[in-house]
Amino acid sequence: MTTVTDQSEIPDDVKTLPHTAKLVYRVLADADEPLRATEVADRCAIPERTARDALQRLAEQTNSVDRRPITGREHLFLVA
């Protein structure tokens, strides 16, 4: 499981979000390619629903994460 240890590496707009969103941000930042919610959940060792909620919050409330549709309901997420 990835842990958020260095707050200086997290953008200001992400610092105010819950711990899970920060964890998800770090996983996306460390990824070599855009990730699906299921991949984020696996890498964070959190439930998929929790990962989806954190990804949605990051995409809608910050300028740090982009969401790209790949199918009708599925998206890829990446650090902006």
Image (spheres, rainbow, N blue to C red):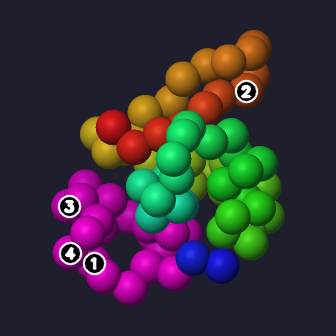
Q: Residues within 10 Å of mark 4 (few under 14, many from 20)?
A: few
Which numbered disc, 3 or 2, marks the residue that appears first in the sequence?
Answer: 3
Q: Which residue is mark 4?
A: 8
Q: CA distance from mark 1 to mark 4?
A: 4 Å
Find numbered disc 2 in the image and state the secondary structure of the residue it sits on.
loop
What residue type is disc 4 on? Ser
Q: Which residue is mark 2?
A: 74
Question: Which quadrant is home to the C terminus?
Answer: top left
- Left or right: where 70 falls relative to 8: right
Q: Nearer the viewer, residue 22 or 60?
A: 22
Q: Is residue 51 magenta?
A: no
Q: CA distance from mark 3 to mark 4?
A: 9 Å
Residue 2, position as x, y percentages in the image: 57, 76
Q: CA distance from mark 4 to mark 2?
A: 31 Å
What residue type is disc 1 on? Gln
Residue 62, position as x, y percentages in the image: 32, 44
- Left or right: where 4 falls relative to 69: left
Q: Residues within 10 Å of mark 3 (few under 14, many from 20)?
A: few
Closer to us: mark 1 or mark 3? 1
For image coordinates 74% across by 69% down, the residue present is: 46
For image coordinates 51% across by 30% down, the residue present is: 67
Q: Residues within 10 Å of mark 2 (few under 14, many from 20)?
A: few
Q: Which residue is mark 3?
A: 12
> Answer yes or no: do the residues labelled 1 and 4 have beta carbons within 8 Å?
yes
What residue type is disc 3 on? Asp
Q: CA distance from mark 2 to mark 1?
A: 30 Å
Find numbered disc 3 in the image and state the secondary structure of the residue it sits on.
helix
Q: Which label was assigned to residue 7?
A: 1
Question: Which quadrant is home to the N terminus?
Answer: bottom right
For image coordinates 38% across by 85% down, the residue present is: 5
Please report the bounds of the magenta region as a residue range: 3-23
Q: Residue furthest top?
A: 72
